[in-house]
Image: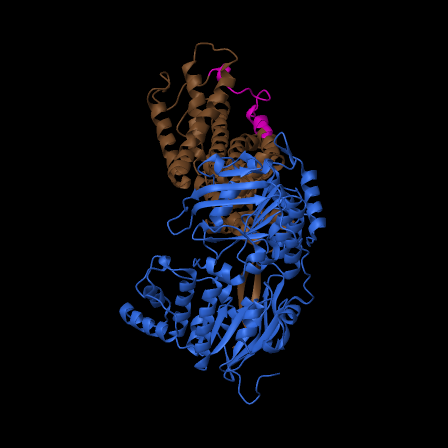
Chain colours: A brown, B blue
Amino acid sequence: MRRLVLERRAETPWALTLASPLLAVGLTLVSAVLVFLAMGRDPLEALFVYFIMPVSDAWGLQEVAVKATPLVLIAVGLALCYRSNNWNIGAEGQFLMGAMAGGWLAVATHGTGAGAWLLPAMLVMGALGGALFALIPALLKTRFGANEILTSLMLVYVAELLLDWLVRGPWRDPQGFNMPQTVVFAPEATIPLLMEGGRLNLGTPIMLLVVVLAALLVARTLKGFEITLVGEAPRAARFAGFDAKRLTWTVFAIAGGLAGLAGVLEAAGTVRMLQPGLSPGYGFTAIIVAFLGRLNPVGCLVAGVFLAITFIGGENAQIMMQMPLDVTRVFQGLLLFYVLGCDTLLLYRVRWVRRAEA
Amino acid sequence: MTTPLLDAPLLDATGLVKRFGALLANDHVDLRVMPGEAHALLGENGAGKSTLVKMLYGLLQPEAGHIAWEGRPIHLPEPRAARALGIGMVFQHFSLFDNLTVAENVALALDAAEPVPRIAARLAEVSRAYGLPLEPAREVWRLSVGERQRIEIVRCLMQDPRLLILDEPTSVLTPQEAEGLFATLDRIRAEGRAVLYISHKLEEVRRLCETATILRHGRVVARTDPRTETAASLARMMVGSEVAALRHAAAPPEGPVRLSVRGLSVAPDDPHGVGLKDISLDLRRGEVLGIAGVAGNGQEALFAALSGEVLAPRAEQIILDGAAVGRADINARRRKGAAFVPEERLGHAAAPRLTLSDNALVSGHAASGMVRHGLLDRGRMLGWVDAVTRAFDVRKGPRDPEARALSGGNLQKFVVGREVLRKPGLLVVSQPTWGVDAGAAGLIRQALLDLARAGSAVLVISQDLDELLEMADRIAVLFHGTLSPAEPVAGLTREAIGLRMGGAA
C-alpha cells in the first residue's frame, strides 16, 4: 500500500521560495476558469478582462498604481508585524483612523485658505492616528495578554462606525444634499498629482520610498534582525537581549502608522473627501499582499501590483460582463488560501511512501 | 555468539530500514532478543537506537525489513498492537499529567477501561511485588523524577509484558535511584521477562546485560557479551576510534575572584517549577566550576539569573570582575566580558531557520563589532562564522547554511565556538556536550579547559557527572534550588556527589 506523507525539509531550496507564490497564482487562475465555467461565462474572455486589460493601456496602468499604493503601504507594515509573530489583522481600521485624523485637519481648515503647512501636517496626523489606534491592541496584548488577532479585528468595526457617524453627523458637507460625505478637500489639502490630467499622485513615490526603507530595515539593520529573530525563535531573541514586548509596540506602531498614512493619502489624494466607502477593503486585501510577498517589502510591492490588477479587472468585469464584485473577493480569498497552502511545500517535502508489509 | 542456539528467539528483527529525509537512521538493522535475556542496545546519541525501538513498539513503521515475535512474522501498526503481544516500553521522557494522581495516570494509559479504585489496588500490589514504592493517590507533580519513572515502569508491568524496553532509564536518576532500578530489573528478569536496555553508559551495561548490540551511524557494528569486554573496548566499538584523553592541568587555580554570587534567590516562573534559594558561589580566574545535579533542580533558573535573561532582585547579588551586575541585562553583561551558552541548541542558543551568520549575531551584536550605528556588517558576521568553523572544525555543506541543517554535534561546536572565540572573562555554559558525539564532546571540553587556562573563569552546569569530574576544578551540587558549597574535585567521590544530587547530604 502506498500513501502520501509530508516530510520536514532539512533546508528550504532557494528556488522554491520563488516558485511557491507563482504556483499559488497558477492554481488561482485554474480555479478562476472553473468559477467562470460554473457561471456560464467564456473563461478566456473573463481572464482577459480580469488580468490583461488592466495593464494594456496607460490609463489602466495608472489605475493599477493608484490601487497598489495603499495596498503596498499597508502590506509592508503588516509584513513587519507578521515577521515578528504579531498578528495585526486590523489594518483596515488603522487605515480609516489615519484618513479621519488627517481628514479632520482638511475639514477644520476648509475655506480658511491654510498655507503649505497643511498637507505635511495632514500626513503626519494620518500616520499618528493610525499608529495610536494600532497601539490599542499592542497595549492589550503586552499588558493583559489579550489575543491581538481578536482585538485588532474588532477595532476595525469601531473605526468604520466612527467614520460613518462623522460623515453623517458633525463633518457632513452642508451643501452635500444630505449625502454621507465631507466637503471636497480644498486644493491645499489635496495630494499633488504627478502629471496633469492623470490620477497618479505623490502617494505612489512615497510608497516606493517606504518599500526601499523597509527593505533596508529588514536586510541591513539590527532592528530588522530583531524583528525576524523574535518571530523565528522567541527564546533565542531573549538570549540576544531583545525585549519582545517592546518590539510588539514598535511593529504595531509602524504598521498602524503606514496604514494611517495610506488612509490619509487615499482620502486626500484619490478620493479627496471622507465617505463611508473610502476603502474597498484595502486593509484586509493587504494581508494577502503581505503573505503573497513572502513578508518581504520588495515582495509586497510585486504582490500589491498583482492584487491591484485584480481590483481593476474586477471593476472591468462588473462593467463589461456584469460580474458581481464578490467574484473578485472570491479570487482574493482563493489566492490567500493557495499561498498558505503552497507555503507548506517550503517547509515539507511530499513523498509517496510504501508501507512496510506485515 | 554466546547466546544458546537451542532456544527460539523471543523477538527477531531483520533488515529494518528507516529513513528521515536525507538521514538513514536505521540501515538494515538486525536485532535478536532471547526470552529472559537482558539485552543492551548501545550507541552514541544519533546512532539510531531510539528509531529502532520505536519501530519495535509500533510508533514508527519500518520502510523495509521484518519483525518476528516467537517465530511468527508480525506487523505493528501502532503501540497498542505491540502491547497486545506483550511488548512494553518505558520512555526517556515521561508522558504524565502533572495534576492527576498516580492511579489516574495509569488508568489513562491502560488499553482496557477499568475503574480507578481497582487500578489503584492492582498498582499497589505490583509496586510492592517489584520493590517500586508508589502511593497511588499522590499527584504526579509532587513526585521526584525517579518516582515518575517508577509510574511508567509499573504501568508497563501491569500489562504483563514479555519484553520490557527501557530507553536510557538512568539518564534522569541519581546513582542511588539507579541502584534501586537495577534491583527491580533483576526481579523482572527472574520472572523470565526479557529486557531491552538502551544506554550509552558502559558500566551499567556491563553490570546488567549478557548481550549487547552496538549501533553506529544506523548500522549494527557489533554483537558481543559486554561482561567479557572492558568499558574502553565497548566505547571503541561505539565511537569507532580511541577517545582522546583530556589534557588537564594539575594545580587548582588560586587567582582573583572573577564571578561572585551572594544570597541569590529567584522565584520559579511557574507553580511546578524550581527557583533558586540563597545561592552563593565564587569563581576564580583560571578555574572551571562544575554545577552537578539532576535535571529540574533549578538549572534553568540558575542559567537565566547568571546570564541576565532574568534579573536578580539586587545588583550586588552578582559581582562580575568587581562590578555589580545583578540588575544589568544580558547584553550589558556581555559588554563586561561575560558569555553564555544555554542548554537548548535549537531555539535558544540558535534560531533554527536563520543562517549561521545571523546566528553569530544573536549573541554577538552587543560586543563583537558586527553592528555599527544600527547597521549590520555582513562581512564581519560571515568572517565570524568562518573563524568559528576553522577553530572548532564545524562540518557543514555551504559556507553559511541554516542552523537546523547542521548535525547536533556541529551546531553545538558552533554555539560554543561563537562564545569561546570572543575570549570572554566569564563563560557560563549549560550542558556543553548534551547529545553530542564523542569527538565533538572532546573538542568542546578541551576548548573550555583551554579557555580557563588562558585566564577566564568557566562555569559548567551539567547532568553528566563524568564530564564534570573530568573537567572541573571544583564541583557544587544543585538540589531543589539550593547549591552545596563547591569542593575541590580531588577530595570528592562519585558516591558523595550522588548523595547530594539526591538531597541526602
**Toward the viewer: A170 or B29?**
B29
Task: In this rendered view, identify the residue nearer to me: B307 or A147.
Answer: B307
Whether A317 is among the magenta residues is no
The number of numbered discs placed on residues in the rendered structure image is: 0
The residue positioned farthest toward the bottom in the image shown: B6
Q: Is residue B220 above or below residue A226?
A: below
Q: Is residue A197 magenta?
A: yes
Q: Which stretch is magenta?
A: A186-209
Q: Is residue B114 visible?
A: no
Residue B60: where, in percent of width, then height?
A: 51, 68
Residue B185 visible within the image: yes
Across and down, in percent, residue B298 comes to 46, 50
Residue A109 coordinates in the image, percent (x, y)? 43, 13
* Residue B390 appears left or right of B63: right
Q: Which residue occupies 43% across, 11% down?
A: A111
Left or right of residue B271, residue B417 in this image: right
* Spot occupied by residue B157 in the image (x, y as percentages of width and height): 40, 74
Q: Residue furthest right?
A: B390
In the displayed structure, A249 sits above or below B118; it is: above
Between residue A244 and residue A353, name the one nearer to us: A244
